[in-house]
Amino acid sequence: MPSESQMIATSEIGPDHKSPPPGTSTSAADGQRRHARDDLVLGGVLAAITVVYGVQTLALPEDSPNQADIGPRAYPLLILLLLALGTLLLVAQALVRWRATSVADRTSADAGEGVSTQSTRRRYVVLRLAAVVVVTLAYLQMMELLGFLVATAIYLAVETVLIGGVDRYRGRRAWVPVVFGCVAALAIYLVFGRSLGVLLPHGPFVF
Amino acid sequence: MDTLDQLFAGFGDFVDSPLMIVLAAAGVLLGTVVGLLPGLGPSTAIALLLPVALTLDPAPALILMVAIYLGAEFGGRISAILLNMPGDAGAIMTTLDGYPLARSGRAGTALTASALASFVGTIVSVLGLVFLAGPLSDVGLAFGPAAYFAVVIMALVLSGTLVGESLLRGGIAVLLGLMVATIGIDTQAGVPRFTFGISELLNGIDPIVPIIGLFGLGEIFWSVGHPVRNGEDAPVRVSGGLWPRWHEVATLRWTVLRGSLLGFIAGVLPGSGTTLASFFAYSLEKKISRHPEEFGKGAIQGVAAPEAANNAAVGGSMVPMFTLGIPGSGTTAVLLAYLVMYGLDPGPSFFTQHGDLAWVVIASMFVSAVLALIINVPLIPMFAKILEVPRHLLFPVIMVLALLSGYALNNSVFDALMTLVFGVVGYLMRAARLSTALLVIGLVLGTMLERSFRQAYLLSHGSLSDMLLQPLSLAFLGIAVLAILGDVVRAFLARRRTATQADAQRETASAER
């Protein structure tokens, strides 16, 4: 059973064993194989959704107080059946493609150098994205505690550094995200909180 | 001449209100800016407009939103031509010839010619809208719940085949949207469904919240995860004079008209929107050109045709929206969600009940088109500057605006949280190559679909066969089945073609050995 990183590694090299720099050439079979793998993951997620939705659907009462109504269960059941069908088709299709490409790719399974940099880069991107989402979650939690203006200023500064990269703001340039956060937060507060009358959460201060 | 009377009445209402004219101008300007910024499209901009929309009446809000939609199709071409990057999805085809033109020092010509093409495309499509909307809404009025159920099914199937890679992937995205729409208390039986014990979900999820999450946050997350490399290049300087030579413009007239008509038709088809429109127009123009080899190297027709088409698709996509309550594109799905939010109940009866609203919006599109043209030609150097705004400053602000919009609907942090959830969903869907636009279309149509399904069932006294075996229902369901079959056949042929190509390659390879 190959590990996740190995699978990424094999899928990123072309099937042509002789192509000089590995990782730079991506052939059609290569992309197909990666797509097939992604679709298997997607199929798993959809299967989980189908199960959760299915359990909930089957728990619904079949009949409606109104005798002539078809009831609250029929329509979700219809969607459920279609989604189950779609998931099965997707998985079947992915398995067929996976097998078709793995036969063609078997020769290149051992050439894995030079790709590790690419997969570390991908991991870095995923980590950064996860950080962006987690910071956003924290922001929503802090909004009612600190008030919109303060929370937003902090959030903007942090996200700017996260998205722009820490290297950009080393040393004296560290004030750029701070000033930007304060100015932009104030502008948003004035436009939406004051002019458009959105009832923004206002924490311990008036703002 | 009833149609024209209503149109002029719409013009009258529009001109009477300075606010509406100001909003149209603001919308066109804002639309151009979001259109030219890669990663931001009209759907995102319109979704983020929620706090503004809450303070406006439906008519001015819709005028602003439609102006943004139009402006975005103008704006998309600027980054396509100057940066080789489509500013929005409808401008993908414009890069093919726009960028080569800019590199050869004819950026000004390309920009002005495409602005004129966009303008003509808009006008042609709004004329189409004016003359098609009335008759089509009369047809729509004749639909009972059973026929409407079939129409929605047909629209969902057509959207699934026209958008995205395959009917299977499209169908899955649509189904996910339909599922989200079933969350909340079932109004007919009074039973909570799929709420998982969360009281905030009892009233259902307002489609606007997922839309803001998917189009606002999801797109930003995607851009953060997948930085566009050639975006680091400085844009090509605008040079070579703004005005194309008149004989060039004259040779473009048929190209632009063909593109406009094709774009309008593509816009009317459910779901397909601007992307497909520009693709069709470009392909057609290349096929019938006497010099097809020039396409891709800087043919001015290759810029004019897709630009005429993507603007024409805007007007086209309003036709099913106003007359049947069915979105002609992802962006009109957002507009529909707003119509629902305003309690205007889009559907077959919309045009008769809220005709004056529809006509003001249609009238405003003529004015917006003129404003877009006026704004777009002289201000191009300024717009090119906007492309230089660093993305790591822009993205955090857009994220705040998205969360703020999610919050503003009900002043609820829970809704903002849902926005974030759907932002992550949007990112994952793109990673899994599922169309978020289709989820939105399913989401917006879901409630209508179930309602008409159950009403039709009631009216046919509990007999599914009576309900479906009506001539109108059968016709629409038949079209849906044909679309599915066509898609299956097409996929089969494509697979056989690649299989034979692979066989041929294998044979030549073994022959070489």
Image (cartoon, grey):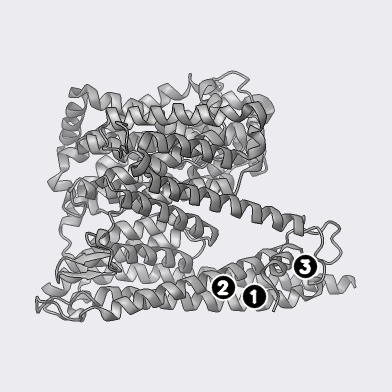
Q: Which label number is shown at residue B152?
A: none
Q: Which label number is shown at residue A15?
A: 3
What residue is disc 2 on?
A: A40
Q: Residues within 10 Å of mark 3 (few under 14, many from 20)?
A: many
Identify the element where label 2 is drawn. Answer: helix
The amino acid sitting under disc 1 is Trp
Mark 2 vs mark 3, CA separation in Å: 21 Å
Identify the element where label 1 is drawn. Answer: helix
Of all chains, the one bearing label 2 is A
Q: Residues within 10 Å of mark 1 (few under 14, many from 20)?
A: many
State the image quarter where residue A26 is shown.
bottom right
Q: Which quadrant does the N terminus of chain B fall into?
A: top left
Q: Is residue B431 above or below residue B350?
A: below
The amino acid sitting under disc 3 is Pro
Mark 1 vs mark 3, CA separation in Å: 14 Å
Q: Residues within 10 Å of mark 2 (few under 14, many from 20)?
A: many
Which residue is more in the foreground, B288 or B245? B245
Q: Is residue B42 visible?
A: no
What residue is disc 1 on?
A: A98
- Give the mark, 2 or 3, whose residue is nearer the N terminus: 3
Residue B139 horizontal side relative to residue B260, left or right? left
Q: Please determine if labels 1 and 3 lie on a single subunit.
A: yes
Of all chains, the one bearing label 1 is A
Counting from the top left corner in percent of width and height, residue B454 is at: 18, 71
Q: Is residue B228 visible?
A: yes
Counting from the top left corner in percent of width and height, residue B10 is at: 19, 32
Q: Is residue A91 above or below residue B256?
A: below
Counting from the top left corner in percent of width and height, residue B209 is at: 33, 51
Which residue is more in the foreground, B49 or B363? B49
Of all chains, the one bearing label 3 is A
- Give the mark, 1 or 2, whose residue is nearer the N terminus: 2
